[in-house]
Amino acid sequence: MHTQRQAELIDAAIRLTAAEGIQKLTIRNVASAIGVSEAAVYRHFASKHELLLAIIDHLDSLLAPQFASLLRFESSYADALLQFITNLFTLLEHNDAFSLMLFAEETFNVDIELKPHLNQLLAKNLVQITQFYSRAMEQGKCRKELEASQLALITFGTIRLSVSRWHLNPETQSLHSQASVIAKNLITLFALH
């Protein structure tokens, strides 16, 4: 768990990176963004690497409950997928800076040691989607011609592309409004019920 000041620094770093790119993410610029000295930032994060690790942890803490909800539902699989995508898109739309950062993994290419951490985050989320489809298949609530892991990749790819397109042109439509269309298409494609 991060302190209030650490959370403030993480938020500033996310917004700075989303607005100006990873090249502008420096301890000096983060300090300037919230009006503190560089020394004050270093009291909380020993390096830019440590700050980036904290960002990944923060993103995970926001996303984990969304993905976990797929495995804790009380309605049909179709309703669960619709609710998951709706809630996820609402979260991402209200936190557009971190969603831009999350779905542009080149952000983390500046620090090669971060790639395994980001990969672990993505893999964990894919596992939960895969488990969701596996359960649906076991109960005869989903088509079985493809492996559950392939359905998970299709779902994750659809989410990622939708978020990326929304970032490129947010004036056309809210991300939240796209959730039901995307979910219904996946439900139809996978014969999910």
Image (tube, rainbow, N blue to C red):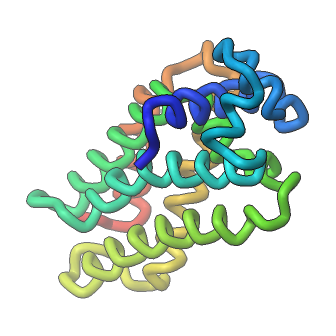
- At x 27%, y 46%, the residue is 83
Quarter containing the C terminus: bottom left
Q: Is residue 18 left or right of residue 64?
A: right
Q: Is residue 140 left or right of residue 107?
A: left
Image coordinates of residue 97 in percent, x first then y, are 61, 29
Q: Quadrant of residue 139?
A: bottom left
- At x 59%, y 49%, the residue is 54
Image coordinates of residue 168 in percent, x first then y, are 72, 27
Image coordinates of residue 17 in percent, x first then y, are 75, 32
Nearer the observer, 81 or 25: 25
Nearer the observer, 14 or 180: 14
Query: Looking at this rendering, what residue extends furthest in the left direction?
Result: 74
Q: How many marks?
A: 0
- At x 74%, y 62%, the residue is 114
Residue 172 in view (yes/no):
yes
123 w.r.t. 18: above or below: below
- At x 84%, y 64%, the residue is 112
Q: Is residue 1 left or right of residue 84?
A: right
Image coordinates of residue 166 in percent, x first then y, are 62, 29
28 w.r.t. 193: above or below: above
Nearer the observer, 170 or 182: 170
Nearer the observer, 182 or 37: 37
Residue 164 in view (yes/no):
no
Q: Quadrant of residue 62?
A: top left
Q: Quadrant of residue 26?
A: top right
